[in-house]
Image (cartoon, rainbow, N blue to C red):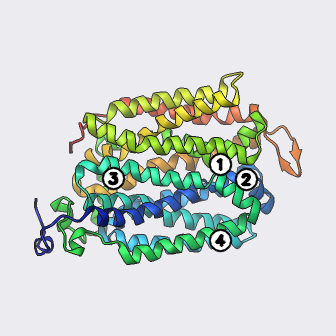
């Protein structure tokens, strides 16, 4: 193994598993809180519409401000994680996330609420890239896809927490008190990051697993890395994976993260808690499938087959969920579960992208793929809201707009179209066989 001078003066031992997982686990918990924040509006749609006096279009925008800032931060995050290091970004990100959460929880002004959501989105944007960066330094390369899947599992645990448990908490304490409570949890993550996280095992006297080129370039120039972001799109797989990720992540986050509960109420007459339970089933299936898909891809030594199959099944699932007539609630939930399992294949995109560009652009490609993920819900959530307002029949209940099933079916054509496009894009990618190909 090639070592830097810093690593050569260490104990010559690899980091113990418990320490590696402790360091990586802090980043995973922060990513969990970010995923929680991402989908939490889904179970408080009525409260938010009533508190801020808004309709579907503005609700979609309020939720999407998280994604606007999240996407905008991915380029600088990919750059900064390669220059500042994971520890500094994790600490700063958790402080800002707590501040944005407090602003969102206390304000009665819609514009300030959007600012709060934007701060949350921009600060939690560091979570996924930091998680992957720490995995690269603290674990063998052969475990990267599995850890990416496990990281997504942690994120989905946060999403599950933001369904039935969050709904029950809101009904008991009110949405503002619950939001402020989550800010305290995020500050706790900041304390853990300060106490435990190190950028590299060599900082604790152990051998690093990172490629020697990554260890030698601890302080790369910012402008050079920004140029690298442009360079990675010269590789065919980068832009194909970039666009395909949004077509898989966008539908499931647009549905479970905002529009699933009102759709289930319109179609099956479900109360918010029961609608949240259906979305929780979807998120759990997505969470469980992600590490399995990553590990299976590692085992067979190929990326493309599992990803393509996941795209095809998920597309068929969305079509069935939205347009098949006469589905019972139990059948709908079963189809939704299968769709979510298939969507777990997106975790392969991170390893696929990593293997498609030169190793020095690890942070940059991770940011690029994550932008692809978040562009999906960023565009779909407000776009669906606009279509719903356009298709609104004029019905009101307790002063809130009521959207019928027909309106949702028109709006959800956007989900189906992007999901189908993802199938075509993935079919055009070049297999890397789980090895660096650039």
Label located before the other in sequence (4 or 3): 4
Q: Residue at x 45, y 47 (%)?
A: 372
Question: Disc 4 to disc 1, how far (Cα)?
Answer: 20 Å
* Left or right: 408 as drawn, with respect to 254: right
Residue marked by disc 1: 258
Classed neighbour count for the residue bearing mark 4: other residues with Cα under 10 Å, few (<14), some (14–19), many (≥20): some
Residue marked by disc 4: 180
Q: Nearer the viewer, mark 4 or mark 2?
A: 4
Measuring from the top left, give residue 269's x and y in whole percent: 79, 37
- Pointer 2 with pointer 1, Cβ within 8 A: yes
Measuring from the top left, give residue 182's x and y in whole percent: 60, 68
Q: Residue at x 24, y 68 (%)?
A: 201
Q: Nearer the viewer, mark 4 or mark 1?
A: 4
Label located before the other in sequence (3 or 2): 2
Q: Nearer the viewer, mark 4 or mark 3?
A: 4
Question: Disc 4 to disc 3, how far (Cα)?
Answer: 34 Å
Q: Residue at x 61, y 63 (%)?
A: 117
Asked which secondary structure carries label 3, the reply is helix
- Compared with residue 309, is residue 163 higher up or lower down, i.e. above or below? below
Q: Which residue ends up furthest to the top in the rendered image?
A: 325
The answer to whether any part of residue 60 appears in the image is no
């Amino acid at each position: 193994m090639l070592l830097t001078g810093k690593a050569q003066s260490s104990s010559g031992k690899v980091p113990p598993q418990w320490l590696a997982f402790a360091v990586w686990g802090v980043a995973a918990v922060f990513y969990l809180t970010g995923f929680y924040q991402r989908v939490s509006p889904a179970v408080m749609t009525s409260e938010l519409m009533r508190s801020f006096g808004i309709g579907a279009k503005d609700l979609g925008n309020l939720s999407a401000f998280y994604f606007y800032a999240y996407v905008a931060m991915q380029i600088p995050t990919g750059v900064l994680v390669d220059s500042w290091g994971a520890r500094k970004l994790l600490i700063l990100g958790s402080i800002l996330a707590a501040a944005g959460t407090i602003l969102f929880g206390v304000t009665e002004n819609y514009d300030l609420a959007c600012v709060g959501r934007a701060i949350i989105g921009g600060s939690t944007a560091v979570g996924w890239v930091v998680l992957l960066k720490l995995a690269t330094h603290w674990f063998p390369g052969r475990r990267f896809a599995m850890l990416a899947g496990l990281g997504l599992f942690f994120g989905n645990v946060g999403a599950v927490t933001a369904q039935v448990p969050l709904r029950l908490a809101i009904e008991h304490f009110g949405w503002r008190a619950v939001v402020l409570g989550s800010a305290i949890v995020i500050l706790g993550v900041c304390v853990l990051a300060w106490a435990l996280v190190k950028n590299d095992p060599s900082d604790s006297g152990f051998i690093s697993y990172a490629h020697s080129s990554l260890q030698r370039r601890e302080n790369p120039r910012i402008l050079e890395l920004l140029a690298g972001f442009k360079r990675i799109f010269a590789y065919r797989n980068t832009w194909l994976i970039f666009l395909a990720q949004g077509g898989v992540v966008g539908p499931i986050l647009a549905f479970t993260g905002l529009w699933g509960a009102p759709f289930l109420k319109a179609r099956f007459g479900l109360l918010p808690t029961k609608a949240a339970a259906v979305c929780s089933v979807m998120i759990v299936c997505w969470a469980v499938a992600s590490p399995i898909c990553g590990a299976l891809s590692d085992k067979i030594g190929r990326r493309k087959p599992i990803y393509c199959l996941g795209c095809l099944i998920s597309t068929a699932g969305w079509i069935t969920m939205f347009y098949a007539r006469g589905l019972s609630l139990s059948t709908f939930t079963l189809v939704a579960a299968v769709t979510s399992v298939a969507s777990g294949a997106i975790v392969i995109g991170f390893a696929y992208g990593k293997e498609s560009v030169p190793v020095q652009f690890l942070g940059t490609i991770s940011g690029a793929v994550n932008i692809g993920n978040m562009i999906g819900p960023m565009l779909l959530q407000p776009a669906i809201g606009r279509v719903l307002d356009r298709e609104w029949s004029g019905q009101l209940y307790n002063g809130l707009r009521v959207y019928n099933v027909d309106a949702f079916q028109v709006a959800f054509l956007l989900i189906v179209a992007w999901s189908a496009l993802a199938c075509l894009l993935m079919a055009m990618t070049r297999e890397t066989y789980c090895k660096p190909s650039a």
